[in-house]
Image: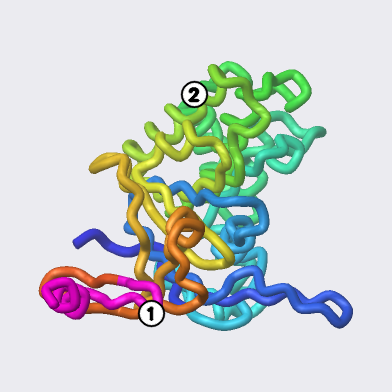
Amino acid sequence: MAEILVESHNLVKIYKANDLEVVALQGLDLRVPRGEMLALVGPSGAGKSTLLNILGGLDEPSAGRCEVAGVDLTRLTRRERLLYRRRIVGHVWQQTSRNLLSDMTLLDNVITPMMLAGYPAGRRRNRAKELLGLVGLGDRLDHKPVRLSGGEQQRGALAVALANEPPLLLADEPTGELDSVTAGEVLKLLRRLNAELGLTTIVVTHDLHVAEAMDRSVAIRDGRTSTEVRHAETTEETVIIDGVGRLQIPRSALDTIPFDGRARVHVAADHVELWPVGVLAGPRQDAARER
């Protein structure tokens, strides 16, 4: 069985503003094996970016459990959270201005996180050159971001994110500002980094093509994991059942069948059936027909 790098159970996040409370995550469960490329999809406001911020150490859970690489994100001190962000996780954002410092060369952008993490001075420059070569920017070391194309900036952002050798890469709409050809190049690079470095990657996206390029897509709805597609195995979307047996019935079913907020459960030998209340289920229905 593959090692689990990311695991959350019954994860809750509540934001408070004045007298209002907004529940962004409502008991979310998620397990991500080491080395997997995962897409988080779903409508705006579903909780995707909130989950990404928690996994990135930028936000704290309100309740539940969340671990990344054996680190319990619910129990970190301020200092421990800072070290976690520097060493365990790398970020790539949609806005290129968030990824690179405009007044620094590309080489210095990659060196900076290593300097903050305490890497030996002699190693920083060599590793930065190695990473920039890996992402195809070995001839752009002395360029500042303004002299780079959008695709080059995102490839440079990947080098910055990987500077401290994190096991987990988080990317929030990394191709959102790129044309389709350039976006395809960035996706190919993500796949190559996954293969060569054993990198675990979680991408938030609204782009179907990006999601299909990942190993698995997980849809989040109303603050919980809802459905998933394992792209290497099938194109079929399956419902996720969380650790306490909860599932979200697809919206198409709710719009078609009058459950009216309740369902009758019938457990058969090899499957479970849900029936609207007032409708005879399973063997009872068959018996009624025979009469």
* Residue located farthest toward the front when viewing the structure as drawn: 291
Q: Kindly identify the amino acid type of the residue bearing the numbered disc 2.
A: Gly
The percent coordinates of residue 8 (x first, y second) are 45, 71
Q: Kindly identify the amino acid type of the residue bearing the numbered disc 1.
A: Gly
Other-residue count near label 1 (Cα within 10 Å), few / some / many at <14 / 14–19 / ≥20:
few
The percent coordinates of residue 157 (x first, y second) are 61, 37
Q: CA distance from mark 2 to mark 1?
A: 51 Å
Other-residue count near label 2 (Cα within 10 Å), few / some / many at <14 / 14–19 / ≥20:
some
Q: Please state, as top left, top right, bottom left or bottom right, where the C terminus lies in the image.
A: bottom left
Residue, x 43% and y 58% (percent of image)?
253
**Segment tinted magenta in the rendering:** 274-291
The percent coordinates of residue 53 (x first, y second) are 62, 61
Splitting the image into 4 quarters, where does residue 289 fall?
bottom left
Q: Secondary structure at mark 2?
A: helix
The percent coordinates of residue 173 (x first, y second) are 60, 41
Kindly tell me whether residue 159 is visible in this rendering: no
Residue, x 55% and y 79% (percent of image)?
74
Q: Which residue is identified by label 2?
A: 184
Q: Which residue is identified by label 1?
A: 278
